[in-house]
Image (cartoon, coloured by chain):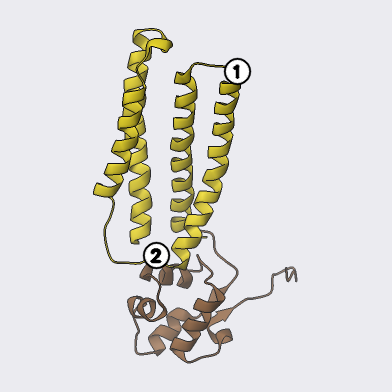
Amino acid sequence: MAKRTRVTNSIRSLRFASGEMTQADLAERIGVTRQTVIAIEQGRYSPSLEVAFQIARVFGTPLEEVFQYPDAPDGDHA
Amino acid sequence: MSLEERRVWTYAAVTLVVSAVYAAVILARVAAGPVADVDYVRPMLLAIGAALVLNMVVGPHGRERRDERDAEIYRHGEHIGFYVLAAVAAAALVLTLAQFAHFWIANTLYLAFVLNALTSSAVKISAYRRGF
C-alpha cells in the first residue's frame, strides 16, 4: 500500500479547469518529471515549498487553493 | 517510470547478477581446496570492472534531468545503504584485527559494497513505488 502524505491537493481539477492541461505540460512548466507530478497528484510525494509555489503560479491561484493540510482527526496539529 | 528509477533498477539488477556470478565462481573454488589457495583477486577485479561497464552500457540513457524528488529519493536510499555498508565494513575491520586471511577480509568488504548497493536500490525503488 502506498504511503500517502497528509497534504492533499487540487491539482487534477485545476489542470482540467486550465484547458485540460496534461501532466506533462505541468511538469515541463515547473521543471520536474511527469512522474513527479503524478506522485504529487496522488499524494505520494510532498513537493518543496518552491515547487508548490510554482504550481500555484502556473494556475494563477493562491497556494491554499492548490494544497490543503487538514487537521488530524484527534486534533493533533503536529 | 522515470529515467532515474530505471537507472536504479538497472543498478540493482547488474549488482545482483554480477555478484551472483562472482559468488558461484568463488564457491566452486573454495569447494575445490583450501581457502588460502583460492585465487579470488582476479575474479573480484573482473566482477567490479564488469559491474562498472555493464551499468554504463545497459543503463538507461536520455535527456530527462533529475528533479528534486529524484534527488531526495537518492539521498534517502544512500543514507539507509550507508548503515549497511558501515556495519559490514566494521565486520571486515574485526576480521582484520583478528588477523584473518586476506580472502575473508576482501570478500567481506566486497559483500559490504554489494549489500550497500542492493539495500540503497531497494529503498529507492520502494520510495518511487510506494511514496516518499
Q: Which mark is residue B43?
A: none
Q: Which mark is residue B66?
A: 2
Q: Eyeballing the image, is A9 above or below B73?
A: below
Q: In the figure, residue A75 lies in which quadrant? A: bottom right
Front residue of this view, candidates A70 and A36: A36
Residue under the image location 36 percent in, 39 percent down: B15
At x 30% / y 31%, what residue is drawn?
Answer: B46
Q: Secondary structure at mark 2?
A: loop
Q: Chain of mark 2?
A: B
Q: Position of residue A41 (x, y in %)?
A: 46, 73
Q: Nearer the viewer, mark 2 or mark 1?
A: 1
Q: Residue at coordinates 33% horizontally, 76% vertically from top-left?
A: A24
Q: Amino acid at mark 2?
A: Arg
Protein chain holding label 1:
B
- Dot 2 and dot 1 residues touching (CB under 8 Å): no
Real-space Cα distance between discs 2 and 1? 44 Å
For badge 1, the amino acid type reads Ala
Q: Position of residue B5 (x, y in %)?
A: 37, 56
Instruction: Find disc 1 in the rendering and name its residue.
Output: B98
Q: Is residue A1 visible?
A: no
Q: What's the colour of chain A in the image? A: brown
SS label for mark 1: loop
Q: Is B128 or A73 nearer to us in this picture? A: B128
Q: Residues within 10 Å of mark 1 (few under 14, many from 20)?
A: few
Nearer to us in this view, B48 or B21 = B48
Quarter of the picture holding the C terminus of chain A: bottom right
Tell me the crowding category of disc 2: few under 14, some 14 to 19, or many 20 or more residues within 10 angstroms, Cα based: some
Q: Look at chain B in the picture and name its colour.
A: yellow
